[in-house]
Image (spheres, grey):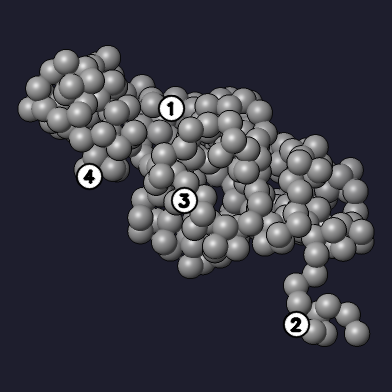
Amino acid sequence: MDDQSHGKMPLASSRRESRGPDLFSFIECAIQTRSIAALFDLLVNFASNEGFDKVAYGALSCSNERRLPEYLPPPPTINFPSDWCQRYAEQEYQAIDPVVRRTAMLPRPFLWDELTSRYELQPRELRVLREAKEAGLKHGMSVPLFGSQGRSAFVSFASPFDDADPQDRMAHLTTLASAFHNAVAQITPPLDESCETDIPLTPRETECLYWVAEGKSAWVIGQLVNVTDNTVNFHMKNVIRKLGAANRTNAVAKATRRGII
């Protein structure tokens, strides 16, 4: 009697043993697919054969917003657990998610697990990673992508399996992500030349915004940059206005996706 008969989840390694069509087949299928939803289903199918059946794709439409819009994009380009997506949106985790922040800075694919060993993460960042694991995203990796006409995007792959090894599958998953991104570019319209320009934040406003993103209070920021907390609040009001944000947390999220901080 097999594991499924006992109600146990199969190991990622056993899934990889029966890997489906090769990467060339994916590329051949992708260039013949004419809808984003169908392309995403194709990507999920091939990624599942690598042991990573949870996928998220976020694309940009404006080169000035050169990194990430929101980490969790709308359907049909994400199949993360729905409860996790809802909590992520409600808590505005995109403003503190270390995966988002590193995807915005690193020009190479990276493992989520390496973030805790390579960087000094804050408690709130560690909380996002911990809750993601609890939601079933046990191991994952993200691939920053850059294409023609300033098209920037990312693909994240995650697995619910404890024994999943994204390092072992990184080359294949990166190739899948790149081929998918190129296929998306072929069936989406050219970038709008009326893209909004860079937000003209002053150096002091950018500095204050950075420290807000790090979780510092107005008083602490004032001590760090040698101004009063009232001055910090003044700068942050300007930041919120310029970014068209609802509040400070929303301003951090908007600035993160534009690559301002």
- The residue at 67%/62% (across/down) is 160
Residue 15 x %, y %: 85, 62
Question: Which circle's residue, 3 or 4, is located before the other in the chain?
Answer: 3
State yes or no: discs 3 and 1 in contact (Cβ < 8 Å). Answer: no
Q: Nearer the viewer, residue 136 or 120?
A: 120
In the displayed structure, 27 sits above or below 209; it is below
- Horizontal side of 29 relative to 72 (left or right) equals right
Q: Nearer the viewer, residue 154 or 127?
A: 127
| Residue 129 visible in the current orientation | yes
Displayed quadrant of residue 41? bottom right
Question: Which circle's residue, 1 or 4, is located before the other in the chain?
Answer: 4
- The residue at 39%/26% (across/down) is 261
Residue 127 x %, y %: 45, 51
Question: Which circle's residue, 3 or 1, is located before the other in the chain?
Answer: 3
The CA distance from mark 2 to mark 4 is 47 Å
The CA distance from mark 1 to mark 4 is 19 Å
State yes or no: discs 3 and 4 in contact (Cβ < 8 Å). Answer: no
The CA distance from mark 3 to mark 4 is 22 Å
Residue where numbered disc 4 is placed: 246
- Horizontal side of 178 relative to 94 (left or right) equals right
In the displayed structure, 91 sits above or below 149; it is below
Question: Which circle's residue, 1 or 2, is located before the other in the chain?
Answer: 2
The label number, if any, that marks residue 259 in the structure image: 1
Residue 175 x %, y %: 78, 38
In the picture, the quarter occupied by the N terminus is: bottom right
The label number, if any, that marks residue 128 in the structure image: 3
Residue type, label 1: Gly
State yes or no: discs 1 and 4 in contact (Cβ < 8 Å). Answer: no
The CA distance from mark 1 to mark 2 is 45 Å
Residue where numbered disc 2 is placed: 7
